[in-house]
Image (cartoon, rainbow, N blue to C red):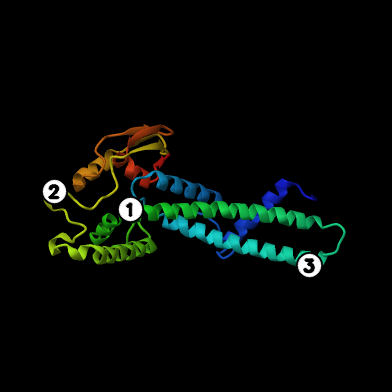
Amino acid sequence: MDIDISDILADVSRSHNYAASSSQPQHYSSTDTDAFADHQLLTRAWQSERCAPDLLPYPNDLMTRVMSRLQAQISRIEDLAGGMSDEYATNHGLAQPRGGMQNANLVLAILQTDLSRTQFLVRSLLRQRLAKITKYATYYLAEQATSGGRPSVTMSPSEVAFLRHHQALLGELYESSFLNAFPQGLRRLDDSSGGVAMVEGPDPSQAVVVRCLAEGTWSNGRDIDDARDSGIEEGANVGLRMRSGEVWLVRWRDVKKGVERGELELL
């Protein structure tokens, strides 16, 4: 090959960053987020969603940036593949293929591998979230009903629409299958009479493994005070103090707010 592998990787990185930002005004500030940092955030969100018993807040800004970069990278791969086809048609019949064709093949393979890696994380993250939504559909639908029409922080608009349509179809299926044979007073799926609630939600006492990302010492004292003042039974109730880098096995309810704020990560 006529150039070093490190030069090819650097060219791929420059081209990817340009493609992701070509549609934006050409000015930069300290608040710009690069692709590498977003990939780390996406990996952390995917890992946390897999480990958390509850549905975590939807990373709307992160997903918007990631999906924009995916579209830009798909376009670049298509342009590169189209250029390779044109070059092959032009040079077909030559005894020795040009070195540029070999380099382009490697660049294309790198871009496609990176695209597949990111697509896997996005799809797996969304599937984990949909699995929780379908498992605790009635619970999350009740949360939506008590939100007073405010936009959901936990779910994206598409997930909220999916939840409502899923629950509507499930209710129609149950009604036509067996509920219509029950007395009217026994047809509700969210009945809590008799002291036993039919609605099952995530277990706030489930054990999780977390690592402290905050600088210095992290404490959940503020979360305990907020839960006590708000009368939330499933809120934090055991005081924790963790130093940066420490790994603990704790109950989900005591670290949930810290994970949502990005001060802790699930392992």
Q: Secondary structure at mark 1?
A: helix
Q: Nearer the viewer, residue 30 or 121?
A: 121
In this picture, is 210 found above or below 167? above
Q: As shown in the figure, which amino acid type bears the numbered disc 3?
A: Ala
Is mark 2 in CB contact (under 8 Å) with mark 1?
no
Q: As shown in the figure, which amino acid type bears the numbered disc 1?
A: Lys
Q: CA distance from mark 1 to mark 3?
A: 53 Å
Q: CA distance from mark 2 to mark 1?
A: 22 Å
Q: Nearer the viewer, residue 119 or 241?
A: 119
- Disc 2 marks which residue? 195
In which quadrant is the C terminus drawn? top left
Report the label total: 3
Estimate the x, y position of residue 213 in percent, counting from the top left.
42, 39
Q: As shown in the figure, which amino acid type bears the numbered disc 2?
A: Gly
Q: Which mark is residue 135?
A: 1
Is mark 1 in CB contact (under 8 Å) with mark 3?
no
Are there few (<14), some (14-19), or many (20+) residues within 10 Å of tag 3? few
Residue at horizontal 49 percent and vertical 47 percent from the top: 43
Q: Earlier in the sequence, mark 2 or mark 3?
A: 3
Residue at horizontal 72 percent and vertical 56 percent from the top: 105
Estimate the x, y position of residue 136 in percent, counting from the top left.
30, 53
Q: Earlier in the sequence, mark 2 or mark 1?
A: 1
Are there few (<14), some (14-19), or many (20+) residues within 10 Å of tag 1? some
- Disc 3 marks which residue? 89
Q: Secondary structure at mark 3?
A: helix
In this picture, is 244 found above or below 27? above
In the picture as drawn, the residue positioned furthest to the right comes out as 95
Estimate the x, y position of residue 34 in percent, counting from the top left.
54, 52
